[in-house]
Amino acid sequence: MSLPVVLFAVLATTTTVSALGVVLARNIVRMAVWLLFTLVGVSLLYFLLGAEFVGTAQLIIYVGGTLVLFVFGVMLTAQGPLRELRTRPAELAVAGVLAATLFALLVTVSLRLAAADTTDSSAPPRPAELGLTFLGVTEVNPGGAALGVPEGTRPNRTPVAYLLPFEIVSVHLLVVLVGAAYLARAKRRLKT
Amino acid sequence: MSELGLPPFLILSAFLFVCGVVCIATKRNAIAVLMGVELVLNAANLNLIAFARFRPGFGLDGQVFTLLVIVLAAAEAAVALAIILNFYNNHATVDVDEANELKG
């Protein structure tokens, strides 16, 4: 039992229990709290997998942004009976059977997929390489300048760069947020 | 990290995915359905990160995709919440079973 295994066991248990809490909780506010623990658990799993930047982004954007948005939505809509909407028992039973089937299917497929070859990559990638992947440049020598390209040499291009998708996503986010603000604006009451 | 391979992460991600699907299918509160969607997206992200870590040749593409998915999920949550608030203003409820105006 090495340290990563123990850490994974703890994190996996936390995440699993929290996800079950999201499913089983009836109160919408409690669901939001369970979701908070699930998201934090997943972000710590990213840290465990050596994806520090993505873990931090998950903490900032998901836990700090999206979840706060959810809590505001709950605050604006949860009144009286809407706070606890019961699911019908028959629906719950059907969903449980379907979920068990889907879980068995997914585990079978992923175990077959993982058994093909699992070779641990030598070293976990460093956060600086993530930025270079966006630019489509591979670092030539580790002691290079901040850009990752030593002076006087042409940068080594990777086959794909993710700068354009990144820009598209950022503009998309801007447009979507403007649209959301327009959709959710306070409407003036019509004079009758 | 060597004895902790790809399969545990895949199984955990499958469990998160199933939890999200059950949330989407059974919850009647529209915001709870949205939380299920977030669980599904997190499961997919966990898969991407795990493959990026354990498959050489996959490189950092998985992390890049995960970042894009996180941003898109934030956008999706914003729009969905705006729609839900509008629905609440018009119908005074967030029960998705009540949203049946388009039923044929």
Image (tube, coloured by chain):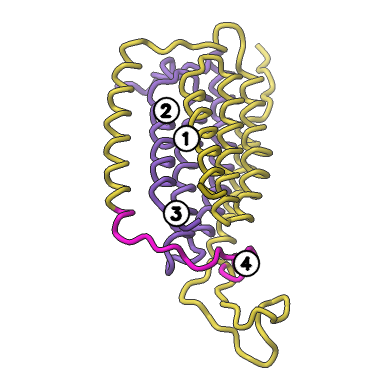
Chain colours: A yellow, B purple
Q: Is mark 2 on a helix, strand or loop?
A: helix
Query: Is residue A153 left or right of B44 when viewed as pictured?
Result: right
Query: Is residue B44 left or right of A39 when viewed as pictured?
Result: left
On whether disc 1 and disc 4 are found on a single subunit, the reply is no
Q: Which amino acid does label 4 sit on?
A: Gly
State the residue in front, A1 or A165: A1
Mark 1 or 3, nearer chain start: 3
State the residue in front, A34 or B34: A34
Q: Which amino acid does label 2 sit on?
A: Ile
Q: What residue type is labelled 3?
A: Glu
Q: How far apart are marks 1 and 2 (CA)?
A: 7 Å
Q: List the single residue furthest toward the right.
A: A146
A93, above or below A50, in the image: above
Q: Residue at x 44, y 59 (%)?
A: B54
A145, above or below A48, in the image: below
State the residue in front, B10 or A139: B10
Q: What residue type is labelled 1?
A: Val
Q: Which residue matches tag 2?
A: B24
Q: What element carries label 4?
A: helix
Q: Residue at x 40, y 63 (%)?
A: A119
The numbered mark at residue B37 is: 1
Q: What element carries label 3?
A: loop
Is residue A59 shown to the viewer in this render? yes
Residue A119 magenta-drawn? yes
Q: Which residue matches tag 4?
A: A131
- Are discs 1 and 3 less than 8 Å apart at CB? no
Image location of residue A93, percent across then percent down: 31, 16
Q: How crowded is mark 2: few (under 14 residues within 10 Å), some or many (20 or more)?
A: many
Question: Which residues are the magenta region?
Answer: A113-133
Residue B11 magenta-drawn? no
Q: Tell us which disc is closer to us: 1 or 3.
A: 3
